[in-house]
């Protein structure tokens, strides 16, 4: 069963747009840079997202979101807990982010 991981961010007020663009690009690059520990091939199926554009005004401070697709819970678990590329991006995000939310949903494809 595939997994859709939805990650939402609220950047700190003093985080500049250049820093946000840089880290957003690094998130997108993980699609190619995160490699499966056995096959050494990319294992993230897709990454989509960026700056919010919803008109309702219900974001509660969230400004950016990304949906990351995995083929299996095992791939998601490796990504979340062990993938060195992902963990490096998380470390870079830490000082820039006021809050974040992560939810995982089953894929319906």
Image: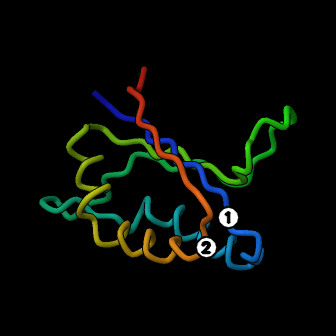
Q: Earlier in the sequence, mark 2 or mark 1?
A: 1
* Residue 61 percent location from the top left of the image: 73, 50
Q: Residues within 10 Å of mark 2 (few under 14, many from 20)?
A: some
Residue at the spot of label 1? 11
Position in image of residue 3 (x %, y %): 36, 35
For residue 60, what is the image quadrant?
top right
Using the rendered view, name the quadrant where residue 79 is placed. bottom left
Mark 1 is surrounded, within 10 Å at the Cα level, by few (under 14), some (14 to 19) or many (20 or more) other residues, namely: many
In the displayed structure, 35 sits above or below 19; it is above
Asked if the residue at tag 1 contacts the one at tag 2, i.e. Cβ–Cβ closer than 8 Å, the answer is: yes
Measure the alpha-carbon separation of dots 2 and 1: 6 Å
Q: Residue at x 58, y 49 (%)?
A: 8
Disc 2 designates what residue? 96
Going 61% across and 73% down the picture, which residue do you hit?
96
In the image, taking residue 6 as reference, residue 13 lies left or right, namely: right
Q: Quadrant of the C terminus?
A: top left
Q: Residue at x 72, y 53 (%)?
A: 63
Q: Is residue 72 above or below residue 92?
A: above
Horizontal side of residue 55 vs 69, given as left or right: right
**Element under label 1?**
strand
């Amino acid at each position: 069963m595939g997994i859709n991981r939805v990650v939402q961010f609220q950047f700190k007020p003093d985080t500049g747009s250049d820093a946000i663009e840089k880290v957003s690009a690094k998130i997108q690059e993980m699609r190619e840079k995160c490699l499966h520990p056995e096959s050494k091939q990319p294992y993230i199926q897709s990454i989509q997202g960026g700056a919010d554009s919803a008109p309702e005004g219900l974001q509660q401070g969230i400004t950016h979101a990304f949906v990351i697709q995995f083929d299996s819970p095992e791939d998601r678990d490796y990504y979340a807990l062990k993938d060195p590329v992902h963990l490096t991006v998380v470390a870079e995000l830490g000082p820039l982010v006021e809050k974040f939310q992560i939810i995982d949903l089953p894929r319906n494809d």
